[in-house]
């Protein structure tokens, strides 16, 4: 069950016009305004998305690999279904729900539990942004500083947020995120989301491979996600009904 909760927290296909996003010539001389204009140009635009998602979850010496179905109606719903329909997740702007037929349990609540784990307010948009390779908080030229760091553009708030420090690294060749990082130094919590590879689907740039590293004190969790067989703008259903007789679980 832990792999599924982590995917919900950190988010957590017959291809059409599929190609890997290739880097052009890197230019490290651009202004902050020019970099952000190029970055925002590649924000994916679509109505619906479906994909097969391979998830490798590692915690300490334990490792699990799962393939799940992902469906999304942008800004409205994220739906995840495991093999044999054993576990199903529904995330909307209002709530987080899932049920598990392996132990006959379900959860039906809001984002407060997940927000407490991250130490900041979490909502549907932030989860969606993580999955799509968008910055979890909007980057704008007035509130962020830009520097060149390790052959890429590093953005950080002019005034870091009270609970954590935030960093974005933008690739200077294709202007998508290489990484977004949240650090709660006082709590010894670190969350790194690295976007290792992008793909072009119907002229939209979407993540193909991403790696999530979550550190808390001496505990390290690594989640590797690969999105395959993506299709866009098809008519999709999002069936979800908690089976009768299941027991509610408390995630506090």
Image: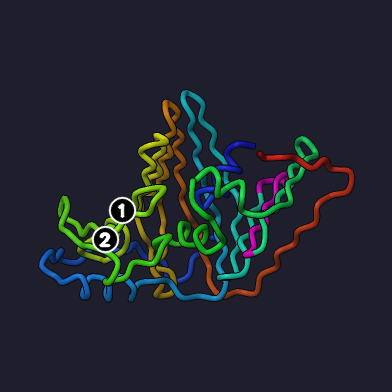
Which quarter of the figure is the C terminus placed in? top right
Instruction: Check if mark 1's residue and mark 2's residue have beta carbons within 8 Å.
Output: no
Q: Nearer the viewer, residue 195 or 202?
A: 195
SS at mark 2 in the image: loop
Residue at (61% x, 50% y) in the render: 112
Say which residue label 2 marks.
158
Residue 52 higher or lower than 212, as above or below: below
Magenta span: 82-93
Quarter where residue 198 is shown: bottom left
**In magenta stretch: residue 83:** yes
| Distance Cα–Cα, label 1 vs label 2 | 11 Å
Q: Position of residue 133 (x, y in %)?
A: 41, 60
Quarter of the rendering occupied by the N terminus: top right
Tell me where residue 38 appears, x and y as whole percent.
27, 74
Q: Nearer the viewer, residue 146 or 120?
A: 120
Disc number placed over residue 58 in the picture, else none: none
What residue did someone put label 1 on?
A: 167
Identify the mark nearer the N-term, 1 or 2: 2
- Rendering coords of residue 44 (x, y %): 43, 71
Q: Residues within 10 Å of mark 1 (few under 14, many from 20)?
A: some
* x 76%, y 58%: residue: 240
The picture places residue 81, in percent across and down from the top left corner, at 66, 52
């Amino acid at each position: 069950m832990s792999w599924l909760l982590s995917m919900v927290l950190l988010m957590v296909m017959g291809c059409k016009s599929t190609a890997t996003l290739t880097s052009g010539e890197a230019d490290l001389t651009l202004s902050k305004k020019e970099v952000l204009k190029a970055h925002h140009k590649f924000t994916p635009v679509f109505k619906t998305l479906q994909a097969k998602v391979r998830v490798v979850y590692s915690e300490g010496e334990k490792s699990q690999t799962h393939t799940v179905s992902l469906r999304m109606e942008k800004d409205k719903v994220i739906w995840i279904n495991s093999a044999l329909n054993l576990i199903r997740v529904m995330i909307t702007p209002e709530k987080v729900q899932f049920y598990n037929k392996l132990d006959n349990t379900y959860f039906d609540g809001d984002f407060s539990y997940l927000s407490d784990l991250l130490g900041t307010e979490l909502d549907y948009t932030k989860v969606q942004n993580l999955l799509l390779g968008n910055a979890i908080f909007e980057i704008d030229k007035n509130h962020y500083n830009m520097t060149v760091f390790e052959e890429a553009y590093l953005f950080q708030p002019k005034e870091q947020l009270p609970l954590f420090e935030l960093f974005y690294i933008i690739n200077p060749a294709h202007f998508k995120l290489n990484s977004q990082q949240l650090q709660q130094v006082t709590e010894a919590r670190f969350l790194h989301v690295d976007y290792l590879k992008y793909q072009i689907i119907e002229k939209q740039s979407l993540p193909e491979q991403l790696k999530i590293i979550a550190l808390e004190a001496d505990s390290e969790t690594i989640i590797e996600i690969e999105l395959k067989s993506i299709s866009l703008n098809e008519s999709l259903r999002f069936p979800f009904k908690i089976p009768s007789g299941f027991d509610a679980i408390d995630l506090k």
